[in-house]
Image: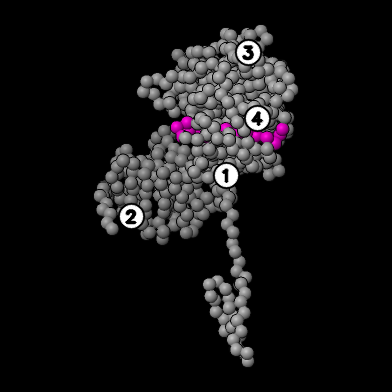
């Protein structure tokens, strides 16, 4: 017997030659199928986490939002954040900017996200999850949101009534106050709320102008009202200046009036209601993170309708102390224990020396958290060591553990588990809290054929050289020279140790050049002796396979090339002709 085998269209055909002729037998080969598994490259953080929301009644249930990188839920089993919005398609990418998060105080598994990155876009939506942020239903809204616009750290502007889970209020930037009476399935505008439209100055830009961000605060007072009907008293804050900006309703939202005697010289940024009935509000002249020139912390007693300025340190623009206040949090176990954060507070001419201030007597006295002694562990995200503490637009005291506090920054955030060390005059210990959050903006990627697995050009950062994609870069980012944006990165195919990057020199390190190269696979960086033009920056760069020729196309400039790494007198301007 003679056997002949052949492959036809993926099937293996075995032909057996015997006395009965050719007998065809077919079967499918056992071919292994490899399925791709996608994971985030580990940088940890990398963008603005602008809000954290704890569930008030369920321990370890908390969420955070980002300006353009989606929202996350905390997973206590793995001790990291898990993305809730990776399922959003490219066509709906505007929804990855999260304007606000609201939890249902009566149901630890229900969470709402108001989504929309830019008000100039065409869509906004409210997403509802009843399983802790694992799956969502979507309600499209008749207005847009601005999760990545000025004021994105304010809030929260959406909240669920703690006495009636059917009722949700949502403040918008441009379209007033809205209310849902059926758990977010449908919405109606609250017509009785005052007109709070802010006129845009002539010729101003409504997106980045020095102006407010609409209705940015919703607070319920559960001490009044009826279970099943809802809270009778609600507070609404509006990002207005030089006019009434805080309103109250005592009849379930049917009518509204401004709080008498309120400070109107700046805009509210955050507010909390303590368990003993006081309202604490942080203010700034700008909603931020655009620069604030003034600000304060005020305490309001609804019973006496009295206001008190309890600012830990006073802003004084006329004397160079131009800064504001970003956030406030109150301990649910001790209503006299609060923390507040400054924003863009200059000290001794530096960029900013923002701090968190803590009080245990309701604002009579304060102590600085960082200046009073604090130690920082950078090991989970080494690159943050090169970035100042900034943009602390949300600070939170864990409702179940007053020693556990968190604050957000432009690259993620920090947490401590010993805030009470301040009472013992011992330093607080802080660690990066952003594990699982990945929201950098890769502008170009390069993978050499040996050495590093990935070398990246990142918006807002220098970039990273990853030897291991599952671990943060041990030495931090491309910090020397440091770029506020890296727009291009590449290397030489036959010389994998040579890597070249271009970008924008950070104003914090103005002595650097916008082109750098590495001779050790992206571990360290050198600068050329000269540039083709003094103002050349950004753009893209390519390198010949042998590494001798570099071609650079800086922004709004001709194309340049060098054969000697930019040595003086050897720079060339080249008009490239493309044929074919």
Q: Residues within 10 Å of mark 4 (few under 14, many from 20)?
A: few
Q: Which of marks 4 and 1 is nearer the N terminus?
A: 1
**Disc 3 to disc 2, C-alpha distance:** 67 Å
Residue 160 percent location from the top left of the image: 65, 27
Q: Which of the image's four quarters has the N terminus?
A: bottom right
Q: Which of marks 3 and 1 is nearer the N terminus?
A: 1
Q: Label 2, on which residue?
A: 549
Q: Is mark 1 on a helix, strand or loop?
A: loop
Q: Which of marks 1 and 2 is nearer the N terminus?
A: 1
Q: What element carries label 3?
A: strand
Q: Residue at x 43, y 26 (%)?
A: 206
The image's colour scheme reads: one colour
Q: Residues within 10 Å of mark 1 (few under 14, many from 20)?
A: few
Q: In this view, does 493 lie to the left or right of 452?
A: left
Q: Is residue 49 left or right of residue 572?
A: right
For the residue pair 289 and 431, the one nearer the viewer reads as 289
Q: State the image quarter where residue 30 is shown.
A: bottom right
Q: Residue at x 28, y 54 (%)?
A: 578
Find residue 182 and name its label.
Answer: 4
Residue 302, placed above or below residue 138:
above
For the residue pair 363 and 98, the one nearer the viewer reads as 98
- Residue 348 seen in render: no
- Magenta span has 114? yes
Label 3 or label 2, whichever lies nearer to me, is 3
Q: Earlier in the sequence, mark 3 or mark 2?
A: 3
Label 4 or label 3, whichever lies nearer to me, is 4
Q: Which of marks 4 and 2 is nearer the N terminus?
A: 4
Q: Label 3, on which residue?
A: 300
**Disc 4 to disc 3, C-alpha distance:** 32 Å
Residue 460, placed above or below residue 568:
above
Residue contact at pointers 3 and 1, CB within 8 angstroms: no
State which region is magenta. Answer: 107-121
């Amino acid at each position: 017997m003679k056997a002949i085998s052949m492959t036809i269209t993926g099937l293996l055909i075995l032909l057996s030659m015997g006395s009965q002729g050719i007998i065809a037998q077919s079967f499918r080969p056992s071919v292994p199928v490899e399925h791709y598994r996608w994971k985030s490259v580990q940088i940890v953080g990398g963008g603005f986490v602008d809000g954290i929301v704890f569930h008030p009644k369920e321990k370890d249930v908390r969420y955070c939002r980002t300006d353009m990188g989606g929202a996350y839920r905390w997973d206590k089993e793995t001790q990291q954040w898990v993305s809730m919005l990776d399922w959003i398609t490219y066509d709906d990418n505007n929804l990855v900017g999260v304007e606000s998060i609201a939890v249902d105080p009566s149901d630890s598994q229900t969470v709402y996200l108001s989504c929309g990155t830019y008000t100039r876009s065409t869509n906004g939506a409210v997403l509802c999850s009843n399983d802790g942020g694992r799956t969502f239903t979507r309600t499209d809204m008749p207005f847009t949101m601005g999760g990545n616009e000025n004021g994105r750290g304010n809030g929260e502007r959406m909240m669920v009534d703690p006495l009636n889970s059917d009722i949700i209020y949502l403040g918008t930037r441009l379209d007033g106050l809205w209310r849902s009476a059926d758990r977010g399935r449908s919405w109606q505008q609250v017509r009785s709320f005052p007109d709070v439209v802010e006129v845009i100055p002539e010729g101003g830009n409504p997106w980045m102008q020095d102006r407010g961000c609409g209705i940015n605060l919703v607070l319920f007072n559960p001490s009044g009202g009826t279970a099943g009907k809802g809270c009778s008293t609600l507070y609404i804050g509006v990002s207005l200046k030089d006019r009434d900006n805080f309103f109250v309703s005592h009849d379930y939202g049917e009518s509204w009036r401004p709080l008498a005697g309120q400070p109107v010289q700046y805009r509210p940024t955050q507010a909390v209601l303590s368990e003993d009935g006081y309202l604490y509000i942080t203010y700034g002249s700008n909603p931020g993170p655009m620069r604030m020139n003034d600000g304060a912390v005020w305490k309001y007693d609804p019973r006496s309708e009295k206001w008190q300025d309890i600012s830990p340190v006073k802003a004084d623009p006329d004397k160079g102390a131009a800064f504001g206040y970003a956030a406030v949090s109150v301990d649910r176990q001790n209503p006299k224990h609060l923390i507040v954060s400054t924003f863009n507070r200059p000290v001794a001419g530096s960029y900013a020396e923002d701090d968190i201030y803590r009080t245990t007597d309701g604002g009579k006295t304060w102590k600085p958290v960082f200046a009073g002694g604090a130690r920082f562990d950078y090991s989970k995200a080494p690159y943050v060591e090169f970035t100042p503490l900034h943009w602390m637009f949300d600070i939170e005291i864990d409702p179940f553990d007053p020693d556990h506090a968190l604050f957000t920054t432009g690259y993620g955030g920090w947490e401590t588990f010993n805030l009470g060390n301040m009472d013992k005059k011992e330093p607080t210990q802080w660690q990066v809290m952003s594990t699982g959050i990945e929201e950098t903006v890769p502008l170009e990627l390069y993978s050499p054929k040996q050495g590093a697995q990935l070398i990246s050009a990142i918006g807002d950062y220098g970039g990273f050289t990853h030897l291991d994609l599952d671990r943060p870069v041990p030495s931090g980012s491309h910090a020397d020279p440091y770029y506020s944006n890296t727009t291009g990165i590449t290397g030489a195919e036959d010389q994998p140790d040579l890597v070249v990057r271009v970008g924008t020199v950070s104003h914090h390190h103005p002595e650097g050049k916008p082109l750098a190269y590495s001779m050790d696979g992206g571990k360290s960086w050198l600068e050329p002796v000269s540039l083709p033009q003094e103002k050349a920056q950004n753009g893209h760069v390519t390198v010949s396979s042998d590494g001798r020729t570099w071609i650079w196309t800086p922004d709004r400039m001709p194309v340049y090339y060098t054969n000697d790494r930019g040595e003086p007198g050897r720079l060339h301007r080249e008009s490239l002709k493309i044929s074919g």
